[in-house]
Amino acid sequence: MTGVGGTTAARLIRAGEDIPVDIPRLPAREAARDELSDPMYHEHDPNLLERGLDRFWDWIGDLLSGASGAAPGGPLGLVVLVLAVAALGAALWWRLGTPRRTVRSPATLFNSTTRSADGHRTAAAAHAEARRWTEAVQERMRALVRSLEDRAVLDPRPGRTADEAASEAGRLLPLHAGRLRAAARVFDDLTYGGRTADEAAYTTLCTLDLDLEAAKPLLTTATARGAGG
């Protein structure tokens, strides 16, 4: 390039060689993304998916780079932080075990099999003989409630829970109300609380069953409230 115009342009180019072109990273990235989003760049492109994945992993890398920059100590600090969180999670898992559901529907006393009170007592005795205390306690609780139904202390009702039976029977047998509630809690803990029974729990329930057999209920719920007052 010659002449006055060429000389002037050359001087401008040489003067600009030492001036860095500094475009902010994020605006430049957004501008490039807007440009490349034009459909004309992607028509009949068999490598579109591959390039999309590359851009996704680039975004993940940028995200991790930002996190490492924000963490104390840079990338090493981020690694230490991640390891500390993992160690805390492992310690909690070891201490507390696998999370369990804590909200469950109350367990009903009786399943589809219909047994008499004596039938449930026989089944409980068989479990106790085999030292299956959990099943023995469950069957003895069913025998206790079935016996109260047979004596018309409780009305026979499908789907009744142990808590409901204890509450209803306790109003007519107030001297045994506390023991009935305790027996219902034991039944619930065994049936859907994941706990196990022992011989002492079975013996306690057998004693309650026998005591209720000899107990005389109050005539009506109204009488029970009057006696309590």
Image (spheres, rainbow, N blue to C red):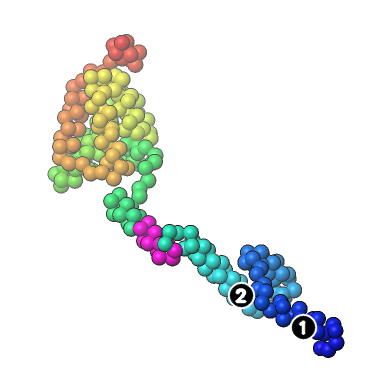
The residue located at (81%, 88%) in the rendering is 1
Residue picked out by circle 2: 51
Residue pointed to by mark 1: 10
In the rendered view, would you say 201 is above or below 70?
Answer: above
Helix, strand or loop at mark 1:
helix
Indicate yes or no whether the magenta region holds residue 83: yes
Q: Position of residue 112 (x, y in %)?
A: 35, 41
Label 1 is placed on what type of residue?
Ala
**Residue at the spot x=33%, y=58% of the render?**
87
- Picture coordinates of residue 14 (x, y %)? 72, 81
Verify CB contact (< 8 Å) between mark 1 and mark 2: no
Q: Is residue 213 left or right of residue 17?
A: left
Residue at the (56%, 67%) spot, across then down: 59
The image position of residue 158, as x and y in percent, is: 38, 34
Residue found at x 25% / y 32%: 183
Is residue 116 magenta-colored? no
- Structural crowding at the residue carrying mark 1, measured as other residues with C-alpha within 10 Å and reported as few (<14), some (14–19) or many (≥20): some
Left or right: where 58 falls relative to 127: right
Location of residue 33 (image quadrant): bottom right
Left or right: residue 43 versus residue 223 is right
Task: For residue 193, say whether it is visible.
Answer: yes
Front-lying residue, 207 or 185: 185
Name the amino acid, label 2.
Answer: Arg
Which residue in the rendered view is the most extreme toward the bottom?
2
Examine the rendered structure and indicate whether residue 80 appears above or below residue 222. Answer: below
Start and end of the magenta stretch? 74-86
Judged by its main secondary structure, the magenta piece is: helix
